[in-house]
Image: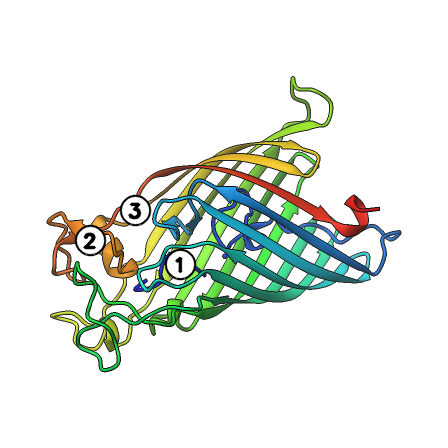
């Protein structure tokens, strides 16, 4: 939050393999366009609840439950080319007391046989925040633990995703996201990730049930913030610590419903995590680093086990 409020607090979104991070719709796996018989227009929508909202390995809800929902109109130019726009929202708990995360996104999804691509732009809006920094005019005093945070953490990213479906059961993919100012911090960010998913062809469950396992790994290359977040030794801004994050999960599906159980972790230490998130709950732990000279540590970037339940529908397929 210092981002980010986590958010990507980091913040930036969409549910992919579990409701974790871009938020609901952002994390949905890329899928091929509808079959030729499908109508030109369609609408996808869904929602869910999770025990914690994790985005790129970092909690956006201060390790508390979160709810999410999305709405995505789509236009199929032909069976292999789809245009879409979307709106999503997640409940969060950022240091600046932002009311929620509201996402606006749009893009194009071309499909070439077993290869599905997705290119677009995503805007993360965090309304209602307050500024906390004793050293800046117009801001409230710094947070009780000394952390500072901007009132507006909103930012945008461009992204590209690719998914290759070897079969109905096995798929792999990769994605890249770029923002010139992550969480409006002044630091640029490039997030590169890959995933693998296996859907069990048969499970010892009643008809209509399914199961899968999936895993993701990503690395967020982060730049240097502006001087709002300056500390001793870095008067013009702090060079955030780039980090790697990963998750592994198992899911059960029934019709439009999914229950996902997932383990998340990162390689960020508590001190550099505090520097990046401006965690309002950080406590003194002796976690001194070059960009975290106060020694306060945050557990927002550590290991977490998340339970998420969601539903996903499309108007033409589910609401006939």
Residue drawn at point x = 89 percent, y = 51 percent? 37
Residue 76, image quadrant: bottom right
Q: Identify the residue under disc 3.
A: 267
In the rendered structure, the answer to whether residue 57 lies left or right of residue 43 reads left
Q: Position of residue 51 (x, y in %)?
A: 44, 40
Secondary structure found at label 3: loop
Which numbered marker is on residue 176? none
Q: Which residue is mark 2?
A: 271
Q: Nearer the viewer, mark 2 or mark 1?
A: 1
Q: For the point 20% across and 53% down, which residue is it?
A: 271
Above or below, comparing residue 137 to residue 76 in the picture:
below
- Could you classify mark 3 by the number of other residues whose Cα lies within 10 Å: few (under 14), some (14-19), or many (20 or more)? some
Residue 10: x, y in percent? 39, 58
Q: Quadrant of residue 309?
A: top right
Distance in Å between CA atoms under marks 2 and 1: 18 Å
The one nearer the camera, 179 or 317, is 317
Q: Secondary structure at mark 2?
A: helix
């Amino acid at each position: 939050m210092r981002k980010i409020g986590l958010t990507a607090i980091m913040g930036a979104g969409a549910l992919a393999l579990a409701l974790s991070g871009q938020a609901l719709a952002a994390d949905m796996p890329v899928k091929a366009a509808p079959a030729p018989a499908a109508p030109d227009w369609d609408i996808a929508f869904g929602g869910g609840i999770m025990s914690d909202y994790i985005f790129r390995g970092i909690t956006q809800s201060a390790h508390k439950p979160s709810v999410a929902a999305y709405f995505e109109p789509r236009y199929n130019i032909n069976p292999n080319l789809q245009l879409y726009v979307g709106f999503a929202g997640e409940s969060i708990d950022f240091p600046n007391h932002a009311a929620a995360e509201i996402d606006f996104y749009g893009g194009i999804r071309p499909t070439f046989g077993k290869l599905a691509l997705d290119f677009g732009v995503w805007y993360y809006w965090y309304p209602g925040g307050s500024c906390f920094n004793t050293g800046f005019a117009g801001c409230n005093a710094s947070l009780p633990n000394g952390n500072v945070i901007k009132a507006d953490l909103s930012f945008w990213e461009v992204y590209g995703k690719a998914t290759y479906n070897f079969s109905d059961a096995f798929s792999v993919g990769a994605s890249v996201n770029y923002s010139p100012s992550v969480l409006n911090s002044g630091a640029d960010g490039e997030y590169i990730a890959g995933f693998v998913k296996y859907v069990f062809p048969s499970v010892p469950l009643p008809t209509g049930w399914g199961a899968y396992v999936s895993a993701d790994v990503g690395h967020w290359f982060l730049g240097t913030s502006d001087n709002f977040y300056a500390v001793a030794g870095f008067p013009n801004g702090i060079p955030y610590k780039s980090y790697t994050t990963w998750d592994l999960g198992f899911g059960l599906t029934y019709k439009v419903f999914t229950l996902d159980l997932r383990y998340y972790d990162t390689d960020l230490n508590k001190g550099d995590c505090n520097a990046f998130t401006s965690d309002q709950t950080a406590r003194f732990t002796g976690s001194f680093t070059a960009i975290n000279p106060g020694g306060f540590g945050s557990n927002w970037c550590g290991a977490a086990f998340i339970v998420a339940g969601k539903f996903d529908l499309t108007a033409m397929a589910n609401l006939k």
